[in-house]
Every structure is written in C-alpha cells, then in structure tokens.
Image (tube, rainbow, N blue to C red):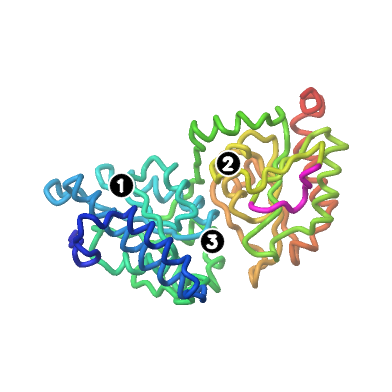
Amino acid sequence: MHLQPRTYWHANKECTPLRQMRSLLRYLEKPLITTQRYKHKMAVEWYYRINITTLWLKVKKNNFFKTHRKVIVISQVVHLGDIVACEPIVRQVRTENPDAFILFALHRNYRELADAFPEVDYVLPLICISEWARFAGLALFDKIYDLNIYGRSCEICKVPWLKSDGDRGITTSNYYNFGNLLDIYCKTGGVTSSSVGPKLSPGEENIEVVSKLNLPDKFVVLHAGSNEQDRELPVSALCSIIKHINTTWGLPVIEIGLKHLAIAAEDKVNRSLCSNLSILQSAEVIRRSVLYLGTDSGPAHMANAVGTYGIIVLGHYRHFCNYMPYSGDYANSIRSELLYHDGPVAEMPVARVIDAIDRRLTVLGETELRSS
C-alpha cells in the first residue's frame, strides 16, 4: 500500500478537511456556477480530496506501514437495498481476514448503514461512482472487493464505471438473470457465494429515539415508495388496503419513507413518519411492527435484515418478469410472502394483497392483536 498525500492535496497544515469543506460549500453557492453537472463535478473533486486526506491521516495514525496490517476495501456505492443485501459479504470478508483493516466505500447518504456494520473499521463516504473510480485506480489498498455492477454510472456524471475485476458479463441490463442481489454482487466482486441473509442492528441510540415516538404496541408498517415509479402500487390501492387493516384488524398503519404517499398528516388513526426518520430509525420501526408491507425497495431489504414478517408485492421490472431480489429468509419464504404479479405492480389486484394480510394476521391471532 502506498500513499503520498502531497500528490493529492496541497501540503498546507492550515488546509484542514473542515476548512476545505466550508470553502467548497461557499464556492458552490456562488451564482456563477449554473449547471448541475458542473457543480457535481466540483463536489466530486473536493470531496475526493477531503476523503483522500482523511484516509491518509487514518493510515498514518494507525502506523499501517510498520505493522503491515492488510488494508481491504469493499465498495457498493448505491442503493439502500443493494447495500443491505451485501451485508453478508462484509461478514464473510471479516471472517476470512480477522486482522485486516476493512473499509466500506458507499454513497455518503447511506453512511449510517456501514457505520452499523461491526466488521467495518472505516467508512469512506463518496459523492458518486465516479469518485469511487478514482480511489479504485490508486494503489491504496491490498485488496479491493468492488461489488458495483460493470457499467453502472452516476445519474449526473453519466460516465459508466468500466472496472477491470469481477464478472464483467453482469451489467445493469441483465443482472437479475444471475440470481438474487447477494448472488449477483458476489459474482461481480469476485467473492465466494453466500447463502445467508443480511443482518442489521439499528443500534441503541436509534432504539432510544424510536422509543420516544410513542408508537402503539402493535402496528403495521407501510413503505409505499420505490426508486422507480413502475415498482409502486397506486395510492388508491394503498388506501383500500389501509382501510381494511384498520377496520378488520383494528391495527394502525405507520408509513415510512422519504415522502408521504398513502397517509395524510391529519389522519387520526394512522401515522406518517415519512421524512422524519433516519435509515436506522426506520429499521427499528420496522423491527417493532407485526407486519411490513411494501413493494421491492430498500426498506423491504431492511425488513428482511431485522427479521420482520414481510408481504412484498412484485411485478414486471424493466424486462425482468420473475426476479428474486432477496437472500436468506425472504428468499426461502420464511417470515415472508412474496406476491408476484404477471404484469406491472400497479395492476396487482388489491384482493390478493388483502388476502395475504389476512392470512398473516390470522396466524398472529385476532384476540392478541385486538388486545393492544
């Protein structure tokens, strides 16, 4: 491993990462910079410099050059569900390298996920896949597990990441032909396949925050959104499902996610926590629920990881007609029911979803649920 900080950063003792960050923010606020792509390019450059400097200081402080401690980086830049799905790989790499210094490189928006992985020693928060490409091209690490799919690109940069390692035959247009997300990323990263499911612990701090929300003892969690609109159920269908849960089972529904879709702020029976929770706080809310309901999205992977029973609605996605995103319990029909529809998710009959909900809540017991 070889690091020369002066190569990447001006050797000015006054030029601390915090000061550089403040300078960046002031610079990006200038009205002369008008295009989103140019702003993004500048952000990538500045954050890269901050990250390389901070990493160098960490390496220097721990004296890795003299101790010859192996430095390994695992990279999965986006998205929420993909990062959660890759958690078993982190455990596997730690098992195989118990004394190594392990980094996890991912988009800065998902940093708290990697912070929750006990096997990770250091989190490298990135702006996008283009910043990761710069790190991957340097001789900084003894071993790189690049889990990013060949050809993946930033939505703003539009520059595909054409990596040299792993299975480059798996691309963004065919990846679900190679198994579930864990299988796919094992292949793309050159990792031995793992059959175990993900695990996620929200942490005591987030448990304490959720405890102060005064949630009911028993409730259903709903996540109505997705990265892509063609994987979402119509709002009208969601409202019908929520009404059925309220009237038939006497259970409130709590909506999580980035934006309110199905539950209004003034609803007196149900509650929307959209945009009010961090990722791990959302995971804790899911963990406390009697049932998770949603489509294929990041929170569905979190439900799998925290061990909550999930009903997941799946349909045609792009040109994939019958794909499996999950590993572990959800892949083996344990604590889950995956509802496949031969067509777009939006055309899933509401009756099928309601029947699945009734089957699960009947197992839990009507008396037990209404006793809350």
Amino acid type, label 3: Gly
- In this picture, residue 217 sits left or right of residue 65: right
* Residue 355 visible in this rendered orientation of the protein: yes
Chain part drawn in magenta: 258-266
Q: Are marks 1 and 2 in contact (CB under 8 Å)?
A: no
Q: Which class describes the residues within 10 Å of circle 2: few (<14), some (14-19), or many (20+)? A: many
Task: State the residue lying farthest toward the front.
Answer: 31
**Residue 232 at x, y = what percent?**
72, 59
Q: CA distance from mark 3 to mark 2?
A: 25 Å
Q: Between disc 3 and disc 1, whose residue precedes?
A: 1
Find residue 179 and name its label. Answer: 3
**Residue 93 at x, y = what percent?**
34, 49
- Residue 259 among those drawn in magenta: yes
Residue labelled with disc 1 = 96
Q: Between disc 1 and disc 2, whose residue precedes?
A: 1
Residue labelled with disc 2 = 283
